Amino acid sequence: MPNTADDARSIYNAELKESLERDFVGQYVAIVSETRGHYVRPTFLEAAMAARESEPAYIPFVIRIGHDAAFHIGAASA
């Protein structure tokens, strides 16, 4: 059984990273590992929904372009 997150990260790093980080830093890409389809949108939800609408049989994994994580959760320092 494929690991969606690991497969999507591999596709991102090997095939998409260079071009997406040049033109779309801060946006989100939803990657469908099984088909190698990818959908770039300004928000996490828009990217995920674009992938699900185009390829409803598969679960996409969303990556924030140019960042280590899609979201940052933590306290701000005073």
Image: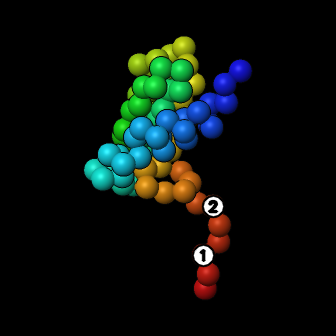
Q: Residues within 10 Å of mark 1 (few under 14, many from 20)?
A: few
Residue 24 located left or right of residue 5:
left
Q: In what element is the residue under mark 2?
A: loop
Instruction: Say if residue 1 shows up in the picture.
Output: yes
Picture quadrant where residue 59 is located: top right
Residue at 65 percent across and 72 percent down: it is: 75
Most extreme residue toward the front is 14
Relative to 10, does residue 67 appear above or below in the rendering?
Answer: below
For the N terminus, give its image quadrant: top right
Q: Residues within 10 Å of mark 2 (few under 14, many from 20)?
A: few
Relative to 66, does residue 55 appear above or below in the rendering?
Answer: above
The amino acid sitting under disc 1 is Ala
**Tags 2 and 1 in contact by the CB under 8 Å rule?**
no
Relative to 36, does residue 70 appear above or below in the rendering?
Answer: below
Residue 8 position in % (x across, y down): 54, 35
Residue identified by numbered label 2: 73
Relative to 32, does residue 71 appear above or below in the rendering?
Answer: below
Q: In what element is the residue under mark 1?
A: loop
The amino acid sitting under disc 2 is Ile
Colour theme? rainbow
Residue 63 position in % (x across, y down): 50, 44
Residue 21 located left or right of residue 13:
left
Residue at 41 percent across and 46 percent down: it is: 17
Residue at 55 percent across and 41 percent down: it is: 9
Residue at 56 percent across and 54 percent down: it is: 69
Tell me how many marks there are: 2
Mark identifier at residue 76: 1
For the C terminus, give its image quadrant: bottom right
Residue 39 position in % (x across, y down): 39, 32
